[in-house]
Amino acid sequence: MQSTSRSITRRLIPGLLLGFLVLIGLALLGDLRQVSQTLLHYRWEFFLGALGFTLFNYTLRFLKWHFYLGQVGVRNVGWRQSLRLFVAGFPLAVTPGKVGEILKAVWLKRASGLPVARGASVVVAERISDGLAVMLLSTLGVYAYPQYWPVFIFILVILLLVVVLSQVRPVVTFFFDQGEKLPLLHRAIHSLRDFYEGSFVLLRPGPMIVAVLLGTVSWLGEGIGFYLILRGLGLEPGLQLAATAVFVLAFSTAVGAASALPGGLGAAEVSIAGMLTFILRSEPALTSSATLLIRLATLWFGVLLGLMTWSISTNLLGLRAEPEFAAET
């Protein structure tokens, strides 16, 4: 158990260090003294409201996660256990390339017996549906600011290509059959088939539409949270500011995910700050403060919740089921 815990911690360290450096860099970029003054006079009730909308986002994404578990045949994991597994995955978002999130599939196997490869398909389907949701929320903003079209189209095409290819079963099966004839690939093909079967089910039109709709509403909530943060910095309320907040947060989330950096660190912050500067013509201190606050209210709030879940669910770190987990349905 201790060795597993140390292994997970080692995976987190690079992302945590990068996150600290990014936060420091943002403060310095906006002039540390001016950023400090901006935050000193910030109306923190708006930040609490943003945290509430982040929890709204997490709630709907959890419903999607639990819905996905049912789609791949998991029936012996109760809501409480499922919630722990879901929230425990938040800190893993800051591992390089988010590969640490695959540990959720390992935890899911311990809790339900679902093969790791099929559990991994749930994690990947989550990311794809979230990606399509934030792309949908970004559409009107990209239409208003055409310079963002190339990045938008690139990310959208990649996501749709994965979904479409996953549904072409004869082609995928043919390649698996050929791979099984090769000694070096024979063992891996079994796991790949499990992963594909899970992906095939989750990326079908029906489940995908449900997942993207849930994701769109959940990420819209987080965008409204960003609007509250901008209001707390003194920006004038209105529909235009709200639309800008939703667009900036959604598009920067997609950019951060596409970068494959831990938690999108660096890429998401640069995107948020750059878009706020371009669209709102904001001062550097305000831009840096807004970026710091929204990342604290979203990414780092989630990491904190995940670490708290780890502290009360040591079975997840030790990869062994506790009696209360095993008995719950």
Image: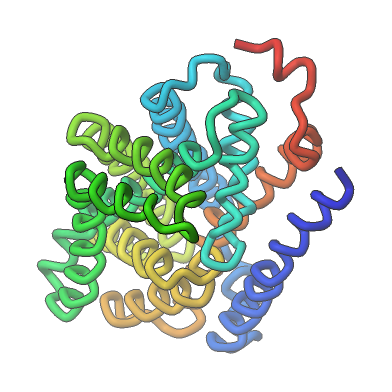
What residue is rendered at 81% in x and 36% in y?
314
Answer left or right for 64 relative to 265.
Answer: left
Quadrant in which the C terminus appears: top right
Residue 283: x and y in percent read 42, 83
- Height in image: 20 above or below 195? below
Residue 221: x and y in percent read 37, 43
Looking at the picture, the colour scheme in use is rainbow
Nearer to the camera, 185 or 300? 185
Nearer to the camera, 158 or 199? 199
Residue 53: tell me if it is visible: no
Residue 319: x and y in percent read 74, 37
In the rendered image, the residue lying farthest to the right is: 2
Answer left or right for 74 relative to 258.
Answer: right
Residue 321 location, quadrant: top right
What residue is rendered at 35% in x and 75% in y?
276
Residue 185: x and y in percent read 45, 57
Residue 25 location, quadrant: bottom right
Quadrant in which the N terminus appears: top right
